[in-house]
Amino acid sequence: MKSGKMGTPSIMDSWPPGGHDPALQCLQRRYLPNLHSQNIPGLLMDPLLRRLVVVSSFGAESAVLLHYVSTIRPGIKVLFLDTGMHFSETITYRQTLEKKFDIEVIDVKPDTNLIENHDPEDNLYRRDPNACCNIRKTIPLHGALAEFDSWITGRKRFQSSTRAALPIIERDRKHIKVNPLAQWSPEDIRDYTHAHELPAHPLQAKGFPSIGCETCSRAVIEGEDPRAGRWPQMPDKVECGIHISPDGKILRRTNGK
C-alpha cells in the first residue's frame, strides 16, 4: 500500500484486505486508545482525514452534531441529501441551522433522469422503498462524496439495535467515516442541547425521534425503538442504504441483506 503523511497509509487506497486497516489503526492509537481516553476534537483535526465533510439529514438531533463539529472545524462543509420528499419543517430547520452555525450546506439532489425513468409519479417509495432510497440518497451521495476523503455522520449506538456496536471510526469503501457521537447517550444529547440552547426540529415535539422523508416517517409511541417510525411500509428496513458495513455491503435490513 502507498504511504501517506506521517508514515501512515493513504486513505485513498482501496478497501483494506483481510480487515487490516493501518489508517484506522493509526487514528485509533492516537485518539481512541481506550474508553477512558478519547480525543474526538483531535481526531477531527487530524490531517490523515484530509478533505472532510459532514453528511446531515437535518433531522432530530442534527443540531447537536453540527454545533459540535463546527466548533472544532469552523466553516466545515455539510452535505444535505435533498430527496425532494422532506417535510417542510425539515427544509425550514435546515435553513435555520445554516444561519445559526458556521457551516456551508451543499444540497445534494437526485439525478432528474433517474427520477423521470424510475419514479415519474413520486410513488416508488410505496412499491420499492429500497429502490427509492437508492436513487434519491445512495447514488447522489456516492457522487457528492467523490471529492472528499472522509465524512462525518451523526449516528449513535442508542438509536437502534443495529447500531449498538457502532464504532467511532470505520471504513466506508475508500472513505474513512467518523461517528463522533457514537457513544453519546440520550441524556448526553439532551444536556448538550440545553447547555448550548440549540433549536429542536419542530417534529420532535410531535413524536418524531427519527425524521427522514415525509413519505416514510411516522411518529412513534412510548416504548418503541426510536427508529420504528422509519419506513413503516417495510418493517424490516432499518437503514436507507447510504452506510456500508465493514465487509463492504450496503446496510438496509435488520438481517443485513
Image (tube, grey):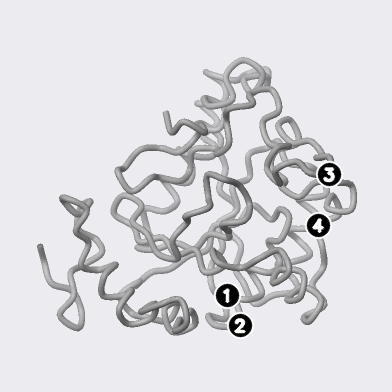
Q: Earlier in the sequence, mark 4 or mark 1?
A: 1
Which residue in the structure is indicated by mark 3? 222
The kind of secondary structure element at disc 4 is loop
Q: Are marks 1 and 2 in contact (CB under 8 Å)?
A: yes
> Which image quadrant: the C terminus?
top left
Q: Quadrant of residue 98?
A: bottom right
Which residue is located at x 57 percent, y 42 percent? 109
Q: Which amino acid type corresponds to the residue marked 2 in the rendered image?
A: Thr
Nearer mark to the viewer, of 4 and 3: 3
Pointer 4 residue: 201
Numbered badge on residue 69: 1
Residue 140, position as x, y percentages in the image: 48, 42
Secondary element under disc 1, as helix, strand or loop, is helix
Identify residue type, mark 4.
His
Percent x, y of residue 80:
60, 53
Alpha-carbon span between mark 1 and mark 2: 5 Å
What whole-number distance in Å separates the C-alpha atoms at marks 4 and 3?
19 Å
Distance in Å between CA atoms under marks 3 and 1: 31 Å
Query: Which sits earlier in the primary sequence, circle 3 or circle 2?
Result: 2
Q: Is residue 105 left or right of residue 139?
A: right
